[in-house]
């Protein structure tokens, strides 16, 4: 089981061409390994999966696996609102050597709960790799209910869920009613500490892009049951958690990582650069966390 602080990794791009910056990607992954990040998600929401071609998507995953070289688990973002496409991406990630796949609920289509069950069941049966469900209704307009999660948790290679609603009651229910080998990850940095203390297994984190060492320490403390230490770190990071969502993710986080000198802050349309007023807020949050 992958536990701890799992960064939802940004995808660096060249400022001029907006092509993927492979050198910066390597630099980022090496930095995360050095800083103590426990795992990474390649090409998730924060990795701009929506604006990468299928070929780029697969290549970023392959590159992450190659660069990591077994030193840190790589979870590949392979979700889609087309079941066939999700199977294709998941198979590609398996061939690349990813440790697991993260599959967002089908967006825009608004499937029923039975449709969600059959979608994930089909992917799990088609590709023999560990698969993690991903529920983020605020972005997908699709909310996977706990009963559906419980049904899916009985499928052998569906091994966990990233629950990004921030609803701790829902997370507690899933933790209580699934087996101990089914992982529950926070997808909401604001409530990640509390979810882990409830029995969760880690945080798939946006904030970890900017503060990997602190997020790793926070998750380690919470996993160890050290609520006081986890709270202390979380208080330091709270302004940063807020700042990462002053505009749509990944606009603020790419700007912040750019300020650390690790890459350009370039994004592809329709995403735009962080506004000047919000740059002030993000900068202050980074200062409050002693990152700059």
Image (cartoon, helix red, strand yellow):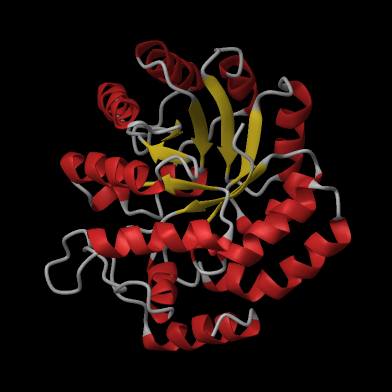
What is the x, y in percent for residue 74? 44, 41
Q: Residue at x 64, y 41 (%)?
A: 3
Taking 95 as reference, is 27 above or below it?
A: below
Relative to 2, 8 lies left or right: left
Residue 92 found in image quarter: top left
Q: Residue at x 48, y 17 (%)?
A: 117
Locate the C terminus and report the quarter of the image it occupies: bottom right
Kindly tell me whether residue 194 is visible in this rendering: yes
Taking 212 as reference, is 259 above or below it?
A: below
Q: Residue at x 27, y 47 (%)?
A: 60
Kindly tell me whether residue 12 is visible in this rendering: no
Q: Residue at x 35, y 13 (%)?
A: 126
What is the x, y in percent for residue 275? 37, 82
Residue 65 found in image quarter: top left
Q: Nearer the viewer, residue 183 or 275?
A: 183
Locate the N terminus and report the quarter of the image it occupies: top right
What is the x, y in percent for residue 222? 78, 51
What is the x, y in percent for residue 101? 43, 32
Taking 254 as reference, is 227 above or below it?
A: above
């Amino acid at each position: 089981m992958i536990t701890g602080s799992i960064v939802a990794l940004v995808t660096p791009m060249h400022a001029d061409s907006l092509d993927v910056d492979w050198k910066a990607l390597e630099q980022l992954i090496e930095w995360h390994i050095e800083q103590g990040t426990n795992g990474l998600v390649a090409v998730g929401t924060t990795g701009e999966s929506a604006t990468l071609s299928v070929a780029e998507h697969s290549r970023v995953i392959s590159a992450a696996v190659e660069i990591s070289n077994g030193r840190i688990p790589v979870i590949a973002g392979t979700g889609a609102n087309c079941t066939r496409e999700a199977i294709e991406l998941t198979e590609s990630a398996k061939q690349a050597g990813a440790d697991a796949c993260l599959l967002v609920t089908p967006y825009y289509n608004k499937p029923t709960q039975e449709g969600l069950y059959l979608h994930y069941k089909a992917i799990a049966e088609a590709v023999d790799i560990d698969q993690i469900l991903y529920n983020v209704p605020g972005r997908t307009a699709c909310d996977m209910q706990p009963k559906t999660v419980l049904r899916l948790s009985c499928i052998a290679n569906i091994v966990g869920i990233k629950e990004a609603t921030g609803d701790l009651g829902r997370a507690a229910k899933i933790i209580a009613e699934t087996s101990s080998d089914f992982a529950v990850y926070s997808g909401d940095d604001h409530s990640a500490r509390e979810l882990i203390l409830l029995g969760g297994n880690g945080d798939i984190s946006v904030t970890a892009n900017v503060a990997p060492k602190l997020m790793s320490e926070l998750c380690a403390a919470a996993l160890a049951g050290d609520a006081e230490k986890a709270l202390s770190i979380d208080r330091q990071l709270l302004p940063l958690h807020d700042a990462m969502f002053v505009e749509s993710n990944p606009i603020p986080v790419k700007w912040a990582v750019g300020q650390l000198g690790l890459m350009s802050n370039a994004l592809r349309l329709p995403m735009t650069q962080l506004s000047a007023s919000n740059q002030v807020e993000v900068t202050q949050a980074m200062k409050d966390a002693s990152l700059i």
